[in-house]
Image: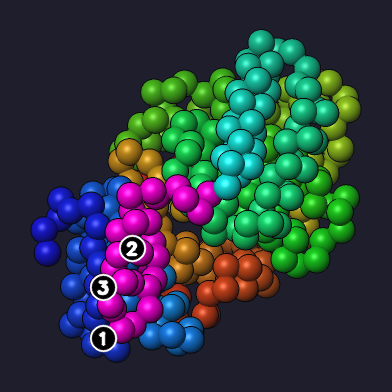
Amino acid sequence: MPADIDLLLADIDLKNPHSVDKIRAFRNVAKPHTQIFIAVTKNDRQNQRQASALGAKKTILKPLSEIGLAIVIEELRTPHRFVTPSTTTIIETSARAMREIFEQAAQQEPIDIRLIGETGRQIAESVADLGVLEWLDTVRIYHHSTFQHVLLVTGIACAFAQGVGMSIEDIAKLTQAGLLHDIGKVWTPAAILDKTGRLTREEFDIVKRHPKDGYLQLVRQGNIHPDILDAVLHHHEYLDGSGYPDGLAASEITDITRILTICDIMGALLERRAYKKPFTVQEAIAVLFKMADQGKIEKALAVAMAQIFDCALSNIRLPENDLLDSAPN
């Protein structure tokens, strides 16, 4: 299969390892914007999950017909037809809000916490209406700048909080923490943030300053909930004490911070960048399980994240290539 095509439509036996391996090989060399559509049997959830694991942007039902193919072609002609204007409006409004907040932080001015609260509320409502997968897909279509990661993490945090039944107050706190968690990166040089290769030790030491830089900026203005401040400061801490900036371990890390940490990891893995293709949901979940087995994050939270994304735990497995080396810090 040529690697430079824009769309691969596959009607294969998903139980045939040879056919599945061909799709995986294609995915590893395809262009970043290439879409994969896979035909599946109606009501076969195993087929649906396997197609998704192979990176299918969309599944269509077997048997393929001229009408079915015509519908696919029409959808490709108008690729955003299923994205409502309110969805794109919320995403662009959220991005503008983040730009304003980051500029306020860069100028050492107090951030507009009311704007953060309203933006978080709109995102939470949109994720509840759309579902997390459509939110993520829409963010990646309509926003490719610095704020893509923030919007991905916040959407995942909303979906997680709603899915596990957190209180309205805690959903608001987690959402606002998602919007603010990387505010300290306004003082990280762009050359480091945008570097495509592995960071040097000196560069990584500079990146590791961003949680504390963001925390200090936010704590100075004095009107932000302590749980949000803690999550901003400690969202890179791990249960085994190997994280930063304070090397916290186990019970020293609060519940909201633990949740934001796995949402941040998930968002980084699912993020689309010029130098890396996004992980599939199943690959990202597999990374969370590996980190849980290593004692870095809580296993119960990884299981809950898999349930939020409707992943069959028996099917998850780590990616076969070295994508982890290009994941953002």
Q: Which residue is mark 3?
A: 66
Q: Please state which amino acid type lies under the numbered disc 1.
A: Asp
Tag count in the figure? 3
The region drawn magenta spans 56-83
Label 1, label 2: how far apart the Cα atoms are: 20 Å
Label 3, label 2: how far apart the Cα atoms are: 10 Å
**Colour logic:** rainbow
Q: Please state which amino acid type lies under the numbered disc 3.
A: Glu
Residue at 84%, 21% (x, y): give it: 221
Q: Residue furthest top?
A: 107
Foreground mark, 3 or 2?
3
Q: Residue furthest left?
A: 2
Q: Please state which amino acid type lies under the numbered disc 2.
A: Val
Label 1, label 3: how far apart the Cα atoms are: 20 Å
Q: Which residue is mark 2?
A: 72
Q: Earlier in the sequence, mark 1 or mark 3?
A: 1
- Vertical placement of 91 versus 11: above or below? above
Label at residue 13: 1
Residue 100: image location, x then y, percent:
65, 20
Foreground mark, 1 or 2?
2
Foreground mark, 1 or 3?
3
Q: Are marks 1 and 3 in contact (CB under 8 Å)?
A: no
